[in-house]
Amino acid sequence: MKNLGIFAVFTILLIYTQADSDDFPLCKACGCSFNSNNTEANVTCTKPNTNQILQDYFWIKNGTNDSIPYNRVVINNDKFINFTYVFPSSQLVYLNLAYNSIFNISDSIFKNLQNMQVLILSYNDLEIIHPDTFKGLYLPERLMPLKSLRELRLDHNKIHTLNQDTFEHTTDIQILDLSYNPFEVIDHHTLLAINNLLYLKELYLQNTEITTLPDNMLHTPKYLRILDLSGNHGIEKIPETLYQARSLENLYLNNTGFVNLTEKNGFPDLPSLQVLHLCRNEHLHRLARFALAGLTNLTDLRLCDNIDLTTIDDFAFAKPTNISGGVIWPPLKKLYIGNNKLSYIDSDIVARWDSLTELDIRDNPWTCDCENQWLIDDLMPIYIKLDENAAKQVMCAAPIEMEKTSFHHLFVRQSQMRCLDTYGHRPEKDGLLLVGVLTDNGTEETRKAPDALPESDEPLKLILYHEQASDDDYVDMNDIYVERTNAYYNLLVDLL
């Protein structure tokens, strides 16, 4: 009886699955998932099925003109080369044709996909996009539009220019990705094409080999919120048109050619900008005074993995005010300055460290001396509250006796770090030499047993105790450095 029940359940499931396949023919050749009511399918095809899936049978209900209710369709890893199939009418909202070796797309093949919001054509071999590639259906108030298309991904192709009418049928696009195409320059035709997108909100131009943006390029897309110019090594200064991006909120300038950012060549006034990424810029060496002065509402700054960045000026993030003669700082909440070449930073680079919600200063060659004492006394308590594990990973790199000593250890021990000599002299290392010069051949025995010295030799005894201390004890000896120096002086007075 039990086996009969199991067989009945298995039979029902088999019939149900078969019914799904009959309702959604693409699911016979591809993987599918369904909505809660099993009325829409999300299809993923990752094996070559060209001869099967590009037939109307898979898209239109048998015996009718009704479209099969696919919601999302992904067709990857095929070799279409010339894509000529005209999709029949469908309610799908997402179509992904990436990784298909597409070299050419015929005109108007997407015209019946009037509900399509996202079209992915990434990782193909496209060199030219014809003006009518995205031509849609007739509407009296529009020029044959794909009326619902909002996101178009053309990244990782071989496009070097765009026809000025490329987007005349898709003027409502809000997200455009042209990354990893060999443009080298945004020429006039490409500029006109992009400027047709009046409602553009996100523009991605990573690794396009460009050196700047044309004048007034950012004037037309007044709703632009995100701009990514990362990976363009030829960009050595901030594009002048950037000041026209009045709605820009996120700017990505990773892996570019910046060397020094100053008040003169730094950022223009961008009061809307909240997020700035300046990471992996291997030639970036210095952020000078007021370099980021125009970013008065910046809340998230990623300034990390810049292997040559040694200097951030105390007022690099600040903006001078004409009224009071003072400065104002952006309301930073997230600050990432890890894995640079910083040995010092001043507490003034941020107005309120205690207002941060995220922080990373790890993997910098920090010098542990009195100039960075505030990092131990003031910043570590804040850092520990934000991310204790990260705080414990911040290490000293200099002076040599402090190397690999953690900031957390210094904080717990309430250590006071000494000030380094202006000329790099190391008087604390001179004790053995001094004792060797001022004592006789029996000093070696004395050094091994300083307790054997009479009370009259207390200064020498103190010196020897200190010189016996291990490197691990050095941190704890900072607070008696002055006492040791006085002992040297008293010994000299007694001997002379």
Image (tube, rainbow, N blue to C red):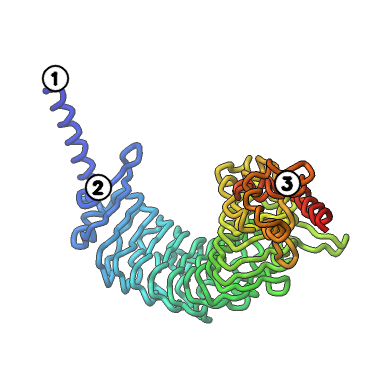
* Precedes in sequence: disc 2 or disc 3: 2
Above/below status of 328 relative to 240 = above
* Precedes in sequence: disc 1 or disc 3: 1
Front: mark 2 or 3: 3
Name the side, left or right, on which 429 lies relative to 224.
right
* Precedes in sequence: disc 1 or disc 2: 1
Closer to us: 204 or 464: 464
Amino acid at pointer 3 = Leu
Amino acid at pointer 2 = Phe
The residue under label 3 is 462
Name the side, left or right, on which 355 lies relative to 494.
left
Closer to us: 390 or 7: 390
The residue under label 2 is 24
Name the side, left or right, on which 44 lies relative to 199.
left
Image coordinates of residue 312 in percent, x first then y, are 68, 63
- What's the mark number on residue 412? none
Residue at (43, 73) in percent of width and height: 181
Q: Quadrant of residue 35?
A: top left
Above/below status of 227 relative to 390 = below
Q: Secondary structure at mark 3?
A: helix
Farthest residue, direction top: 1
The residue under label 1 is 2
Above/below status of 239 relative to 466 = below
Front: mark 1 or 2: 1
Report, in whole angstroms, how far the alpha carbon at label 2 lies from the one at label 3: 89 Å
